[in-house]
Image (tube, coloured by chain):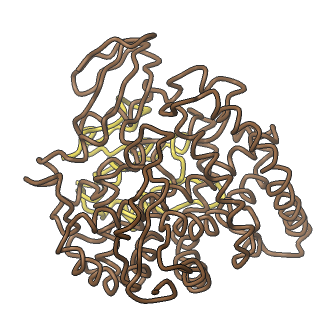
């Protein structure tokens, strides 16, 4: 489909294979909108909008925090403890906003991974961080914002308070630890396992391009926001899809409560049907060809992930159905293209979604299921059901249909039972 | 016939996907932050190597056999390939 936008011709790609090819094509840039991404913009220099050698150098540094050994530390030790500590405190009323619960659970871990020190059991601190995540999430979706200028002003202001109150103290503690390591007083393994530490250790590398303090703050904010918001939205979307199954919902909840591999498939099926970014956008910086289609330089290319994830050739005859057990060829990710592909694929995909399970589902003891699957299992153990008296509310600040503002849930068991 | 596996360290961004898919064929060089082929690549099944190469986010892996390119890195040709 070809159309004409206000400033540039637009091409929409909606097939899985052509979108995947587009995501690998270096001629298609994420710098879609100069006003949004040029120097001085709210996301200036963050990894998700950087390119080429700088992007690869930054990812080399940051990917060290997404290795299986680090992920295992989070999934097997840190997160179960946080779930145990926080979940029953957060389910504190007969009707609970499960999106807020998901945000507060996820932000603790996202903060740890980003390098922001937060007390695991301090709800005031946790809720302050959630506020920052909400603002940065509006910034990350600015291309779909109803009032981009208001979002831009809010994000600028919030960076300043976030840097002063949270990044700077965490930064100073890490610099002190790195100096101790350089003096031989502690081992590298004793340093914090987080993005901020990794960046500070490589800050002098010109390829990593982090000389500007504000850029470090924006990078840390990106990981805080990405690690929190996507997980919380996926949790809500999973429950919404389960509840939408009517009489089948109760057996699905019961199964997810005891079968972590199934809970992981629930997460993957949710990501397929409800991608965080339903329509990605790129701008061709040079003429290129995608799946035989000529794309002139300067074209806006819309990647309709929503449509591609429902391709019946890849996901079966009923691709719109919520079916966590659907057979999918191992060469195709069960979550479709929701984590992107190519150089800019989501670095946190294994944190939230775990590693793909073997085709027959026989996972080993060291398999990583992802943090959202752990959340789903724990919440399903408490018997969630929709609150008949309070309708869920979508996030109307964005045109993305997969974002929620509030989602009210009652529980059959646990602290929230009336 | 042995498959010749090469990995361009300038293109690699250390995602570790190749190590996860073909652990006998690649390892992570933690100092450099990039993957490297291992001697085990020579005895790894071609389908596994192809999947590792296809999955590489920066298309840094090249596969060749008997002088014939089976999978080109993005440095040696067009990046990306359609899934099966």
User: Residue A227: where, in percent of width, then height?
Assistant: 56, 58
Residue at 46 percent of width and 63 percent of height: A350
Residue B58 drawn above or below residue B32: above
Image position of A335 (left or right of A224): left
Residue B6 drawn above or below residue A304: below
Q: In the rendered image, which quarter is residue B43 located in? A: bottom left
- Which image quadrant: the N terminus of chain A? top left
Residue at 63 percent of width and 43 percent of height: A57
Q: Nearer the viewer, residue A348 or A80?
A: A80
Please state the total of marks drawn on the protein image: 0
Q: Nearer the viewer, residue B24 or A121?
A: A121
User: Residue B13: where, in percent of width, then height?
Assistant: 54, 47
Tell me, by letter, which chain the rendering colours brown: A
Residue B1 drawn above or below residue A241: above
Q: Residue furthest left?
A: A317
User: Residue A7: where, in percent of width, then height?
Assistant: 45, 10
Tell me, by letter, which chain the rendering colours yellow: B
Q: Nearer the viewer, residue A44 or B28?
A: A44
């Amino acid at each position: 489909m070809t159309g004409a936008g206000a400033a540039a011709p637009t091409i929409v790609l909606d097939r899985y294979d052509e979108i995947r090819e587009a995501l690998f094509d270096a001629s298609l840039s994420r710098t879609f909108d100069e006003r949004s991404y040029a120097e001085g913009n709210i996301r200036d220099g963050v990894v998700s909008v950087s390119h080429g050698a700088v992007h690869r150098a930054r990812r080399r540094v940051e990917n060290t925090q997404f290795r299986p050994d680090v992920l295992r530390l989070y999934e097997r030790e840190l997160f179960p403890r946080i779930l145990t500590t926080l979940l029953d405190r957060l389910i504190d009323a007969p009707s609970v906003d499960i999106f807020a619960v998901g945000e507060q659970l996820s932000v603790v871990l996202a903060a740890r991974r980003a390098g922001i020190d937060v007390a695991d059991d301090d709800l005031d601190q946790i809720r302050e961080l959630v506020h920052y995540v909400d603002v940065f999430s509006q910034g990350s979706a600015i291309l779909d914002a109803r009032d981009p200028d208001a979002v831009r002003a809010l994000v600028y202001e919030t960076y300043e308070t976030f840097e002063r109150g949270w990044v700077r103290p965490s930064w100073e503690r890490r610099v002190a630890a790195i100096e101790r390591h350089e003096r031989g007083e502690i081992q590298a393994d004793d340093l914090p396992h987080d993005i901020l530490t990794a960046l500070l250790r490589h800050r002098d590398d010109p390829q990593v391009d982090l000389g500007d303090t504000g850029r470090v703050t924006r990078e840390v904010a990106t990981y805080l926001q990405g690690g929190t918001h996507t997980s919380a939205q996926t949790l809500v979307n999973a429950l919404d899809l389960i509840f939408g199954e009517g009489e089948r919902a109760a057996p699905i909840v019961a199964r997810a409560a005891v079968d972590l591999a199934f809970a992981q498939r629930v997460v993957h099926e949710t990501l397929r049907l409800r991608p965080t970014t339903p329509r990605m956008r790129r701008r061709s910086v040079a003429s290129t060809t995608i799946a035989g289609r000529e794309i002139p330089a300067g074209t806006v290319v819309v990647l309709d992930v929503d449509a591609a994830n429902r391709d019946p050739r890849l996901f079966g005859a009923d691709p719109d159905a919520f079916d966590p057990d659907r057979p999918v060829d191992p060469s195709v990710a069960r979550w479709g293209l929701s984590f992107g592909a190519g150089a800019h694929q989501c670095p946190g995909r294994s944190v939230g979604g775990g590693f793909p399970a073997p085709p027959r589902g026989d996972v080993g003891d060291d398999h990583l299921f992802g943090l959202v699957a752990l959340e789903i299992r724990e919440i399903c153990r408490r018997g969630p059901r929709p609150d008949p008296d309070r309708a869920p509310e979508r996030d109307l600040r964005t045109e993305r249909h997969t974002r929620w503002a509030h989602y009210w849930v009652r529980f059959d068991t646990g602290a929230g039972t009336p | 016939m042995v498959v010749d596996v090469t990995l361009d360290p300038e293109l690699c961004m250390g995602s570790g996907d190749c190590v996860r898919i073909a652990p006998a064929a690649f390892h992570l060089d933690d100092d450099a932050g990039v993957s490297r082929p291992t001697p085990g690549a020579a005895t790894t099944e071609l389908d596994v190597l192809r999947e590792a190469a296809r999955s590489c986010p920066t298309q840094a892996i090249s596969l060749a056999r008997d002088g014939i390119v089976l999978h080109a890195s993005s440095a040696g040709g067009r990046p990306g390939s359609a899934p099966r």
